[in-house]
Image (tube, rainbow, N blue to C red):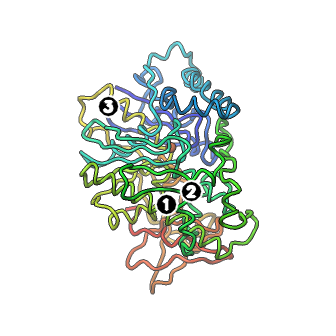
Amino acid sequence: MNILGINAYHGNASAAVVCDGSLVAAVEEERFNRVKYAAGFPAQAIRYCLREAGLKLEEIDHVAVPRNPYARLGTKLFYALRMPSFARGRAKVLAKFTGIREALAAAFDSDAKTIAAKFHRVEHHQAHLASAFFVSPFERAALLSADGLGDFASTMWGSGSGNRMEIADAIAFPHSLGLYYTAVTQYLGFLKFGDEYKVMGLAAYGEPERLETFRDIVRFDANGDSGGFRLGLDYFVHHRTGPEVSWAEADKTPTLGRLFSEEMPRKLGAARAPEEPLEQRHRNLAASLQTRLEEVYLGMLGKLAKATGLKSICLAGGVAFNCVANGKIFDSTPFEQVYVQPAAGDGGLAVGRCGIASAGVDAARSRDDRRGKNIGMVSRARGVGAAGAGESQHCGGSTAGEYEGNPEPTNQAPGDFSSVCAVDFGGGDGRVVCKGAPFAVYDAGVSGAAGKAGADSGADACGRHGAAADCYA
Ligand SMILES: [Fe+2]
């Protein structure tokens, strides 16, 4: 039984293949076309996965594709009436999904009529949850997916047991922790798609002095019955205009229109333009943003732990990339084991869609057989001694190792894009030099006592929280 999973016409276009219950390959299109967060149709990723699996297109039995047009239909219709131009844009993207069979055939210079595979539509957040649970080591676990928006929802939670997942609840548009973080990231002058990690790094250098205002921006009752949160919509515009996102083109990094309203600068002070210097006020705002995210995220996890009585949690969705918040789960919630899908963003959706299709058509198979055996998790770093070229200079002029093996199915993880560097913290004052980005969060492999990853070379700082012991082990 061969299953192809696809994430297409959405950021982080990707593909994955499951053969007889085993995850054989998973990769993002950006690995091939070198376009960060590439959207469009992942033709090269699909060809790579089939090549790794030794399969021809005609040998694929099932294809799991994005979007469930019926998910949250009432909410979609409500906002379609309020935002007709946004609805027209969505309809254009949805029309592309009807041509996935043809796009797949074209990727192989084949005729769509020769594709015998059965096509399955898999909802966005169910795919996120499956991408974590079905490759996790847990037989039973609580599940949480949190991101910007997918299939008109931003958050979903539930539990998994064996081959099955049970969805408890979801939070629909316009309330979204991902859009909250992105809106404040934009307000702080970081406008590129995917810049949130820089602001997470920036937050380490401030104090959450505006936390009360941020509690008004995201409202959450830690003691209430509801497991979810709501945005203070006065601070946002996306519920009035729709999030202006462009990700239909395969050769362009997606762009996202402005999400915050005038209420944000009115309450917090002027928004920062990208070329303006960073001041302590901006660091404090980033810290307030991050602290409120942690309060809500960890509060939701606490409620989920209580509701399920489970000690293990699987996390996915772009918010699950927030390693600072994840690092506080053990101290702040009853969970004792955590699995974060390495491709927690939308690159991992292809893996999750395979998992759901696999569980649906091959339910008798043990979940153990569904774990990845040949994807990036088996790649390895090897030491090569000193070097001094290209990206390695960002790590102090010396390369400690290089990455070897298959690329991981995410642009956030090590793989062929990455340098592996040694950071000698010695007396606790080691410094990582970041020339490329002012707040790159280096997941440095650190042995011994972790010191601080500071800044040099005109850039302000690397995220101190980015240092994670043995993260590549
Ligand atoms: Fe997502």
Which residue lies under the disc numbered 3? 359
Using a 10 Å C-alpha cutoff, classify the residue at mark 3 as few (fewer than 14 neighbours), some (14 to 19) or many (20 or more): many
| Most foreground residue, 412 or 380 | 412
Give residue 294's position: percent from left, percent from top: 45, 62
How packed mark 2 is, by other alpha carbons closer than 10 Å (few <14, some 14-19, many 20 or more), is many
| Left or right of 11 on screen, residue 188 | right
Which of the two labelled residues, at mark 1 and mark 3, occupies the earlier sequence position? 1
Which of 400/260 is in front? 260
Whether the residues at callouts 2 and 3 have beta carbons within 8 Å, the answer is: no
Residue found at x 68% / y 31%: 84
Q: Which residue in the protein does label 1 denote?
A: 293
Instruction: Please name which of the two marks, 1 or 3, marks the residue nearer to the observer.
Output: 1
Return the residue found at the far top: 113
Residue 462 coordinates in the image, percent (x, y): 57, 71
Marks 1 and 3 in Cβ contact (< 8 Å):
no
Amino acid under disc 2: Tyr
- Please state which amino acid type lies under the numbered disc 3: Ala
Residue 48 at x, y = what percent?
Answer: 50, 36
Callout 1 amino acid:
Leu
The first of marks 1 and 2 along the sequence is 2
Upstream in sequence: badge 2 or badge 3: 2
In the rendered image of this protein, does residue 301 appear above or below residue 206? Answer: above
Query: Where 199 falls versus 44 (above or below)?
Result: below
Q: Residue at x 42, y 24 (%)?
A: 60
Look at mark 2 in the image and give the residue it sits on.
181
Q: Element at badge 2? A: helix
Mark 1 near mark 2, Cβ–Cβ under 8 Å? yes
**Separation (CA) of disc 1 from disc 2:** 8 Å
